[in-house]
Image (cartoon, rainbow, N blue to C red):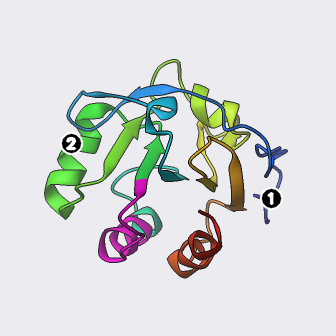
């Protein structure tokens, strides 16, 4: 795990229950993590919509099959409206969740919120069907994650 320079991140720990939350997706529909039990979840925090590195990461997620029982949830502090415009433009059919208000509350619960910048670090959490975090990585805002790492983690997490 890497963390952003100057940021005191304390990510949610592998082996711990994933903090539950409910956020709206790009269509305004509520998504509650605990309602997804039984299947695996890849929870991806990213800084901002319409930015270069974030777009590259989400494009890779769009283009990489993660598994039939895997639900992909992406989270940023952008509004539902920004997420909808971005999803429509880029063809993202997975959930883009708005952690807009209370600002960054879910990113804070997962220990990946940069208070000084007011946005999430590049944190990813793989959650099993029982709601337990089984794998995670946190990269600096300036450093993209590799989707191949998620695929490897999912291969051993059932």
Locate residue 79 relative to residue 8 in the image: left or right.
left
Give me the disc on residue 84: 2
Position of the C terminus by quadrant: bottom right
The one nearer the camera, 131 or 28, is 131
Q: Is residue 144 visible?
A: no
Residue at 31%, 35% in the rendered image: 25
Nearest-to-viewer mark from 2 and 1: 2
The local secondary structure at tag 1 comes to loop
Q: Is residue 66 magenta?
A: yes
Q: Is residue 112 magenta?
A: no
| Tag 1 residue | 5
The local secondary structure at tag 2 comes to helix
Percent from the top left, x then y, of residue 40?
51, 54
Quick one: label 2, few (<14), some, or many (20+) residues within 10 Å? some
Locate residue 65 relative to residue 148 in the image: left or right.
left
Residue at 39%, 69% in the rendered image: 61
């Amino acid at each position: 795990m890497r963390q952003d320079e100057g940021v005191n991140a304390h990510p949610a720990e592998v082996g711990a229950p994933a903090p539950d939350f409910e956020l709206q997706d790009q269509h305004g529909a509520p998504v509650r993590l605990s309602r997804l039990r039984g299947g695996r979840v890849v929870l991806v925090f990213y800084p901002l919509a319409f930015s270069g590195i974030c777009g590259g990461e989400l494009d890779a997620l769009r283009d990489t099959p993660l598994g039939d029982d895997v639900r992909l949830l992406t989270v940023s502090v952008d509004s539902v409206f920004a997420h909808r415009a971005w999803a429509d433009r880029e063809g993202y059919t997975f959930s883009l969740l708005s952690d807009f208000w209370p600002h960054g509350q879910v990113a804070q619960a997962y220990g990946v919120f940069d208070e000084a910048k007011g946005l999430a670090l590049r944190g990813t959490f793989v959650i099993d069907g029982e709601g337990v975090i089984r794998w995670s990585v946190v990269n600096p805002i300036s450093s993209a994650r590799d989707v191949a790492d998620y695929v490897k983690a999912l291969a051993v997490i059932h």
